[in-house]
Amino acid sequence: MQSVTTKGAPAGLRERKKQATRAALAEAAVRLAAEHGAENVTVETISNAAGVSPRTFFNYFDSHDDAFVMADPDVGERIRCAIRDAPAELPPLEAVREAMAGELADVERQHEVWSLRAKVLQKSPHLLARGLGLHMAEERDLARTIADRLGPRTGTDAAEAGTEADANAGAKPCDDADIELYPRLLAAVAGTAVRVAIEHWYAHSPPMTFPDIFRDVFTHLSAGLPQPPAQTDGRPSDGRSTES
Amino acid sequence: MQSVTTKGAPAGLRERKKQATRAALAEAAVRLAAEHGAENVTVETISNAAGVSPRTFFNYFDSHDDAFVMADPDVGERIRCAIRDAPAELPPLEAVREAMAGELADVERQHEVWSLRAKVLQKSPHLLARGLGLHMAEERDLARTIADRLGPRTGTDAAEAGTEADANAGAKPCDDADIELYPRLLAAVAGTAVRVAIEHWYAHSPPMTFPDIFRDVFTHLSAGLPQPPAQTDGRPSDGRSTES
DNA sequence: AATAATTTTGCAGACCCTGCACATTTGCAT
DNA sequence: ATGCAAATGTGCAGGGTCTGCAAAATTATT
């Protein structure tokens, strides 16, 4: 019922059914969890609601929890692509901010589903951890993209053959270690900022809009996290503390 | 705060045995995982190595994974306490930085165990997510502490002299929503910065020391994450790399 | 239409995790 | 020192998660 987005590629009928099954499982999981609690929704229930076998569930998700935090697996790739396409003069933090803003616009569009998802995650920090974990997997690639953007690294850069997407533990896990501190920090902090913005948005959804919060968060970052200007009050209180 | 014998409380013999069992389980889990991989170490194996029953394992850890990421449950409380005790004139970011630095000093002391733990987590991102999740539970309390420090919250200010370590889910989850954006962001970003610093430390352990990396990370933050000054050498000039 | 490739499914099995009852240990008062 | 109350350790039963394996069903190709 919900055509997420019109994928330009027609793709075989088979591919479309796979995506449909995946979406059905994910949506069933979120809706059931929003009502009965994530811990009380078994794989069998989700699969039944989605009209597939319980065994099929594990063909799409590696674990029970992944069904609730699943996000578009291509979102990370799109963000990295946007960062690469950004004009080279743009400061790193702004480039990352704009790239993420482009994706978050889609979140506003699917407001209802994400609202349910947020409610589920708030009630189960356990799942939130899972989501963070998936997010962190992207963080490395994002850091590498930022590093490449800042300047070609000396020596070890095997980013010629782009078809290499295997994340297995090979003989040398050292390439990731070569990423410098700043790209890593920028990627991690930007991701964290987005998370905080989303959480704050759902906490103050009626009065505030997401773009405003998103802008505030990155304003704080680029300002170096100084004392806040007291957004509601007009004056910048310098710390009038009544704390005993 | 560097006295290892901070546990002045004699505590009953019973309490000590509990801590011993907990430590034995955690250490056995880490050492076994470092050798055979975390996924191939069953609860039975861990319990057997620790000399207790498999059933007892779940009296100490809520899940199989928790045994690998277990941290001192009081570390968060100590950090918050340090933030409260910090001089009121100190900028928020510096107060948080100093509070965390005090705890991280202990990590350096238990270098060997943490090294094993880091190795295990690197090979199993699945577990890293778990650790992040536990960290995030603390993030909320940290945000509240920062908010209280910045200015007295209107009305609901509970747990001021809370020496009781209650980390249970209370009846009302609405208070957390009242925390303003800046404290949340500061808590989240600071935690992320520490994580990045630790990861970077283990990636470049021989040439760089943790205090240096720790300082670099927070220098980046307080500078607003500008373009890095190309610090290829070990020493980052100083904190005055901000653009004039 | 026949064949090949892919997906779905059922089944067996190991493991995770929990509630319950009982044995053991610890702390304390008598 | 002895007995009692509280806390902890242990075994068992049972449901839930997750993984191979092989057969059935569906889709794509010849």
Image (cartoon, coloured by chain):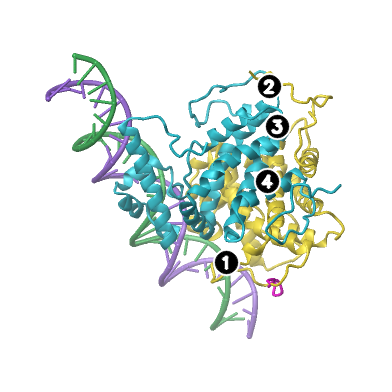
Chain colours: A yellow, B cyan, C green, D purple
Relative depth, front residue between A237 and A190? A237
**CA gap, disc 4 and disc 3:** 24 Å
Residue at 65% across, 41% down: B188
Among the two numbered marks 3 and 2 on one chain, the one whose residue lies closer to the N terminus: 3
| Residue A238 location (% of width, % of height) | 78, 26
Residue at 78% across, 58% down: A83
Name which residue type carries label 3. Leu
Tell me the subunit letter for badge 2.
B
| Residue B159 location (% of width, % of height) | 56, 23
Identify the residue under disc 1: A173
The local secondary structure at tag 2 comes to loop
**CA gap, disc 4 and disc 1:** 25 Å
Badge 4 local density, few (<14 within 10 Å), some, or many (20+)?
A: many
| Residue B180 location (% of width, % of height) | 71, 31
The local secondary structure at tag 1 comes to loop
Identify the residue under disc 3: B90
Relative depth, front residue between B156 and B233? B233
Q: Which residues are magenta?
A: A156-162
Badge 2 local density, few (<14 within 10 Å), some, or many (20+)?
A: some
Relative depth, front residue between B2 and B119? B2
Name which residue type carries label 1. Pro
Identify the residue under disc 2: B152
